Amino acid sequence: MSTGSAALAPAAPGRAVTGSAIRQVRRGGLIVVLLTAGLPALVAATYAGVMADPAAAGGLRALAGNPAIRTLFGEPIGLDNAGGFTVWRVGTALAVLLGVWSILATTRITRGAEDARRWDLLLAGQLTLRGTVARHLAAVMLVPVVAGGAVTAVLLLAGTRTAGALTYGAGIGVLGLFFVAVGGLTAQVFPARASATGTAVAVLAAGLLTRMIGDGLADLAWLRWTSPFGLLALSAPYHRNWILPVLVLLAATIVVAGAALVLAGRRDLRGGLFAERSGRRPRLRLLSGVEAFAVRRMVRPLTGWALGIGAYYLLIGLTAVSITEFLTGNPRLADEAARAGFSLGAVEGFTATLFAILALPVGGFTAMRLGAFVAAETDGRLTLLSAQPISRPRLLGAELLATTAGAVLLVSVAGLTTWLGVAISGGDLALLAALRGAWNVLPVVLLTLAAAALAVGWAPRTTGVAGSLPATGGFLLLVLADSVGAPGWVRGLSPFAHLAPVPLTGVNWPATAVTTGLAIGSTVLALLGYGRRDIRV
Amino acid sequence: MGDSALRADHLTKRYGRLTALDDLTLEVTAGEVFGFLGPNGAGKSTTIRLLLGLARPTAGRAWVFGIDAADVARAHRLLAHVPADVALWPHLTGAEILHLQARTGSGVDLAYRDELVQRFELDPSKPAGTYSTGNRQKVALIAAFATRAPLLVLDEPTSGLDPLMEREFRTAVATARARGQAVFLSSHQLAEVEAVCDRVAILRAGRLVQVASLPELRDLHRSEVTLTYTGSPPALAEVSGVGAVESAGEGHVRFTLTGSPAPVLQALAAADITALVVREPSLEEIFLDYYGAADVR
Ligand SMILES: Nc1ncnc2c1ncn2[C@@H]1O[C@H](COP(=O)(O)OP(=O)(O)OP(=O)(O)O)[C@@H](O)[C@H]1O
Ligand SMILES: [Mg+2]
């Protein structure tokens, strides 16, 4: 603080930290803002064309009465106008996207940087841990704020109603803020980035499930007040335009962010609330080679993902019978649903539609595993193994093998729990049919893994983006292409466009072969690249 | 070929416009302890990364016991490595990491490993996330010294160790040498290099400026001579190898001497010398000479 040192040190070290934090999130943040604002803009702009048929609008409104539909897609309210339709069609997907990105970005630039000891030097100066955490959270929070503002602006420009645009923009923005706060809190509680991210994502998944249950069961409707996604639904943009739930979510955000800052002020650098301080007996299982070790590192995150995916598909199984019975009783509605993109005629058709989106979480899992692999390389954890007599392709290959096995397991869990749910609710779905439906998405998952691997081999910095292209990118492309009536070849770029609705129909073998072939080719290229490039430390 | 542990041939690494390592040609013989010195940013770690195949050379090649360094699956069977910045898996304990390294490596002397754990006073039951810098370095050092690999490549392995542990480190290097292992040791600690190394190489701004044994290195450098005389001061100004002549008080003269002492001894034969003290240059002085020198070559 003395004037003598002021000339040497940057005039405002705090501002320099904020600046560096913003630089770390601006690229991903820009993509997220473009998606959250761009997708609704396109859907809203084309609403008139899609809804030209009055029967379509009426049919969709009738669906609102079915509890299962409400469970899975959210309450279809306000479908009579462009804004309401847009929110129902892409709102949940975008809220999940923004929430997941907020968590990943937050834990990456806080606990991740701390893990990699990048904060040691920072905190040797005048900055406190609490101040540093606060500045990083604020930097990530800029993104949901900008995204919320941008989505409101584009919805207004698209000519939708003002109150609805404001409610939706505020809701999704605050939802993003909430998950930044959650990521910030778990990053203080857990002394490692992986556990911090995993726990925050588990909170998100629980919030999503709670909303689904609250939407589906009238008796438990109050549950929606306990979930960020439920609060977003309660605000009912373009319908009730109720701002209270958004304020509740904002208050929760302030409490969680405050808790994160209090904890940050109390703990040590690189410590956590549950730091493993004391010694323990060695657990030597799965340490016998790189392949085994890759499995060992995967077990914990895999368990978390399996629980989340299992719970979601159990719920789908449980509601499948109710939905299909409802639709059989209302054949016109089934038609309308098909026109809206859901073939819900039979349990097989219904589950097939839901199995397609299984590629999203499982693809996310594979991309995340390779992201962790790159992080281990960058912070030097991989150096000791790289100096062992293990060829580079084998090192990456071990990771790819373990991740593939994990993905197969996750997909199978989804098939199994769906079957279980249907069986419990007295429906009729063969176990093998459920498993075939789930396994049908494996080529898309493998393509995601291969894209991430290709990035690891040739441009490790882009692993996150590359890994989310085939599944998340492909899915958004399909939603977009369907919503705006894009030319067929644009739709065809999405791997989802070539996915047959298994178990309703058979597997689209040619497409499966092409997708798998692409995945294998990319993997070979990835291994070649990883064998040739410098290890980055 | 059989007795060269490491060989670098015109090894060059460029990062964009920066030449981190420029045309390094070097050989380390089997069983020798080889010091690798240079100021910060000289290219020591870069050299080691090239020798280990962790980075690809822009030009040139390297061999480990005659095996191309790029063929890591074979070359690494013959070496063990301690990186400059040891990062460990935070959830694994020290013991688990040692186990993983042993199982993925090419042979470990388990009894000696346990002895090293004792000697370095490491608590292997703690998760690595709780280890200090020095403790992380100890884990990597124990893992490396415990192998039977004929070559140990250590990058500033003692930067985080306290003096007591530094002594254990020197003992471990001596033991490794006695077992016939070669050691390639990059370091800033001159006392350590002086204590354990047979030969040293000096790197500066990516270029090799000297490879020599320590006595050779000394011979190349100035010693400081102080004379005590009675009567008139000896005439030294014109004698070859003598420089910086200065009076060191009544009846004393001090000067530096480079190369053979014969001319000085001849010149002094005429004078009445009562005492003569020769001080060898410290390694530090030798290095300051190299580090400070303007562009070599
Ligand atoms: N991946 C990289 N990209 C760009 N430049 C690099 C990279 N790695 C090293 N350098 C540069 O190469 C030069 C040599 O670095 P190196 O780490 O080999 O030095 P060193 O001798 O080990 O230094 P120290 O004693 O500080 O460890 C430095 O100027 C460094 O900035
Ligand atoms: Mg170095």
Image (cartoon, coloured by chain):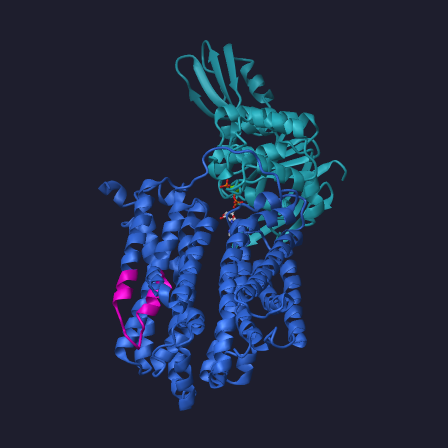
Magenta-span inclusion, residue B109: no
Q: Residue at x 59, y 47 (%)?
A: A296
Q: Is residue A215 left or right of residue B26?
A: left
Residue A260 appears at what percent x and percent y?
A: 33, 49
Q: Is residue A396 left or right of residue A76?
A: right
Residue B17 appears at what percent x and percent y?
A: 52, 56
Magenta-span inclusion, residue A230: yes
Where on the picture, by quarter, is residue B105?
top right
Q: Residue at x 61, y 73 (%)?
A: A503
Q: Residue at x 32, y 41 (%)?
A: A266
In the image, A58 versus B201, the foreground residue is A58
In the image, A23 versus A332, the foreground residue is A332
In the image, A503 versus B192, the foreground residue is A503
Residue A424 appears at what percent x and percent y?
A: 54, 63
In the rendered image of this protein, which colour is used for chain A? blue
Chain that appears cyan: B
The segment highlighted magenta reads: A227-249
